[in-house]
Image (cartoon, rainbow, N blue to C red):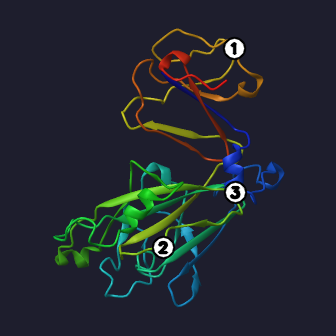
Amino acid sequence: RILGAVSPTMSDEEYEEEYEDYDDDASQKASSKSATGPLIRVSASVDLGSGQESMPSVPLAEGLKIWPTASVDFRWAGATLSTIPGPLQGGYLLQLPGGALGGAGTRLSITVAGSDARVYVAVEVPAPGPSPPGSSPPSLACLLAKAQRWLPEDLAPSWRLPASDSTQKVAKPEVSMFSTFAPQNVAISMPEVISPSAAFVVVVPSVVGSLAVSVTASSGASYEQTAVMEEGALAWLDRDHCYYDVPEAMMGATLFQGPFKDMPGVLSVRPNSAARVLLLLERGSGWNPPE
């Protein structure tokens, strides 16, 4: 039986080592969200092998051209966003040169100032080819699936060609999406692209001062019910067991009240800002902590 709690404090020692230059002084963050969202600045550059190019960012919206500078030779030239999943709402699209992100040898670096953010990469999944497995270079989707700190998302956006191009009968793209947390002022890099594929990047700023956490389980077990961690808090959503003698460091944390018996499989935790994630295990579950 597994329980989870998330506390909006500094992350653990491994996180600090990974992001040793991250400035956690909350006074340097914006204290409120304006009518147009947090004031952020996205600095992004892509190395195409012939030098780095900077890229502008624009607010995400349905009907927006994804690759406005794409050449006519690019398969998805003129494509626009047709659906935007919830996690991308309020985000900013990086306007990369047409198809550049998916070009072989491409290296992308992103730095966000003014707010923590989450960086999403939507990438077309190539259709299975006739070549034996392992004989072709890995796609960008495959590289992101294996990269540290990049998590797969359940939802993904979709795009379409203008009506005038519908006679081309281009198949609807199969798209996967991956994301990673981007602390402000910390450069986030993507794996170097080996096999070309269509892809784009969206940066979604965190709402400063409001901790939001998404917890999903590969088994399908629900972790949507939450409570404040305190004396007498219910441990599970389907039992009446309560917590007592709660350590001071855990008081006020967000407690995820999962099921009593159903094991989560792979549990994915996505906070919208730096946080300490605590996993509580019952001693009788077959694991005993070291002395």
Q: Can see residue 62?
A: no
Quarter of the rendering containing residue 275: top right
Quarter of the rendering containing residue 134: bottom left
**x and y, in percent, of residue 25 in the image:** 82, 51
Choose mark 2 or mark 1, whichever is in front: 2
**N-terminal of the two: label 1 or label 3?**
3
Towards the viewer: 214 or 269:
269
Q: Quick one: label 3, few (<14), some, or many (20+) residues within 10 Å? A: some
Residues under numbered marks 3 and 2 in contact, where contact means CB atoms less than 8 Å apart: no
Indicate which disc residue 231 carries: 1
Q: Secondary structure at mark 3?
A: loop
In space, the residues marked 3 and 2 are separated at their CA atoms by 20 Å
Indicate which disc residue 19 carries: 3
**x and y, in percent, of residue 109 in the image:** 59, 71
Query: Residue at 51% across / 87% down in the picture?
Result: 49
Query: Residue at 73% across / 39% down in the picture?
Result: 9
**Picture layout, residue 46 above or below residue 287:** below
Towards the viewer: 68 or 233:
233
